[in-house]
Image (cartoon, helix red, strand yellow):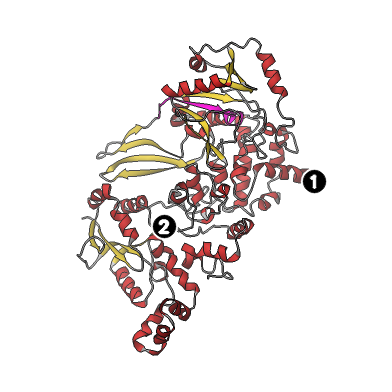
Amino acid sequence: MKPKVAFFDFASCEGCQLAVLNCEDILLDILGLVDIVEFREAMSETAPRFDVAFIEGSINREQDAERLRDIRARSTYLVAMGACACIGNVQARSNFIAPAENFQRVYGVEDRNMVQTDPEFWPLWAHTRVRAVKEIVPVDFELRGCPLVPEEFVHLVKALVTGATPRFSTQAVCVECKMNENECVYDQGETCMGQITRGGCKAICITNGYRCDGCRGILPHANLAAHHGLLQSKGLSEPQITNRYRLFCSAESLGRVGRTGHDK
Amino acid sequence: MSAFFVHKEAVTQWIRHLARSNTVYFPQRAGQSGFRFKPVKETTEIQFDRYQPTLAPPGKKLAPAEEPLFRYRKQGDAAPELVPILDQSPRILAGVRPCDLKGIHLMDRANREGHGDPHYLTRRTHTILIAHDCLQPCDDSCFCDAVGSLGWRDNADLFLTSLEDHILIEVRTGPGETLIQGMNFPVCTDVAAVKSRAEAQRAQPFGRQFHADLARIPAIIASQWQAPVWEKQVERCFSCGSCNLVCPTCYCFDVHDDFDLTDPNAGQRTRTWDGCMLPQFAEVAGGHNFRPNPAARQRHRVKRKFEYLTERFAEGSFCTGCGRCGRQCTTDIDIFNIVNDLIDHAEANS
């Protein structure tokens, strides 16, 4: 019997699900290996149990956390899919701003006060921290990146259906950048997060003329002191450096970089 | 063997002529600071004078970053059927500088050892090398003279030396000869005179020099296992592996199997570059890592280039002095400085 696979989205742009659907040329081959039983972006059916649940998006509200726990309880394997699910992504930048200030910025003073005075608004207080999936439930596998890398998705599906251990890069983006024989971003007078960021993306941004902004998260062995010093030596101010570190890696980088930095 | 003294313009036309019926790689400007070995097209600028070591060394054309090794298919209990994938497409690497020529020589030594690597050796057999001498150091990072690469020519099929607006073409092998056939180039009647005129233009000293003779360096490094230099030199290291991946003599790789979506019993084994500065390089089953910290990895890398491999293959150095690792390190960790620091430390403590 083919494994039952489901896709769920939380706070995200659904771009990762789109990236999966964009595997058009091999999508039918994948459907030969698995049964997709829930996938809001593509179908309306639902199912009670799943062999593999793919979770897209960060967890912003307590009711989302409850829904996630329920999915976890009904799944054999749970996969965090994309930067939002894995590390919080750009929306987790709000974690560095006091909730009241945040509400005021978005909704104005009057509505900010409603959150305090009106019981109907109280549940919004639960939205005080944008969380990665692993902060709430155990995660078996991570498909990192904004968006995820389709080749890694296919690789994971293959590994799951055969019981093999999937391989994901724990090397710096520089490895694949050098494999592509790119001119280093630093030699073009720019700065880059590649040396401290998890690879596996084939250095796609640099290969296409941009820099690495670190969407796959900070490497466990990252030499942050050296990287911080390097960015300073290239003339970046402390607020600029903090912004670079927090752009994608917000939830993950908390406590690791930029504790004393600014986020304006 | 024969030699010709040819106007640069005619050499340029000859390279273009070769490129019409062959795949000819020649160093071409890439981005703001670098060069890449890329196939020559009709519009390619071919010039011999302005050069910086390419981002990747030309020898990597013989061992690409990712290459399929074989296809497999398993049916029932029978032994799997294996079909090797060998790249027999002929190619010419032109404008290869002596440091990289020596890099290819050292890659040949390593890949011919033992059973030999059929994938590398098949490409190598179908490759012709047109080298070009250096009369000036490429930049401040180069130290080819210090490691004995300057003027290296042993494995060149054709060896070129620029002298003002002419180029001396020395034919060194049969395959090299075939590339010259029919060109009617003017024969060089006094090769020694042309070479000595070129030699006279060579910078002295040529690039950076070590604080000790190359012959003494393996023993010095062997004596410095516990030197504080290793720790000091990795304070700024990211363990990103760039120094390995741009090195003309780094040949380590990893392999993985990938089955076909349409048939899980069939698939392909692929190898990709690996590097000893990457944290997981020396990790084994069970999770033990023989070199868990950057200092231990850096020591291993330096000892490979200046001690282990030089002794195993009786070569003066497995570092070619091309300077790529130091040039492309974003925090300027330079193997040349590491070796000099080790020499200084050894002298100070002897």
Total tally of numbered discs in the picture: 2
- Snapshot quadrant of residue B324: top right
- Give the CA distance from mark 1 to mark 2: 50 Å
Residue at image x 48%, y 23%? B16
Camera-nearest residue between A107 and A50? A107
Magenta highlight on residue B129: no
Camera-nearest residue between A33 and A129? A129
Q: Is residue B157 visible?
A: no
Residue kind at label 1, given as amino acid type? Ala
* Residue tagged 2: A145
Q: Bounds of the magenta span? A: B87-102
In screen coordinates, is B254 left or right of B227?
left
- Snapshot quadrant of residue B103: top right
Disc sitting over residue B184 in the figure: none
* Residue tagged 1: B348
Where is residue B133? Give x, y as percent: 62, 25
Where is residue A184? Give x, y as percent: 54, 46
- What SS does tag 1 mark? helix
Look at the picture and state if A94 lies above or below B17.
Answer: below
In screen coordinates, is B224 left or right of A26?
right
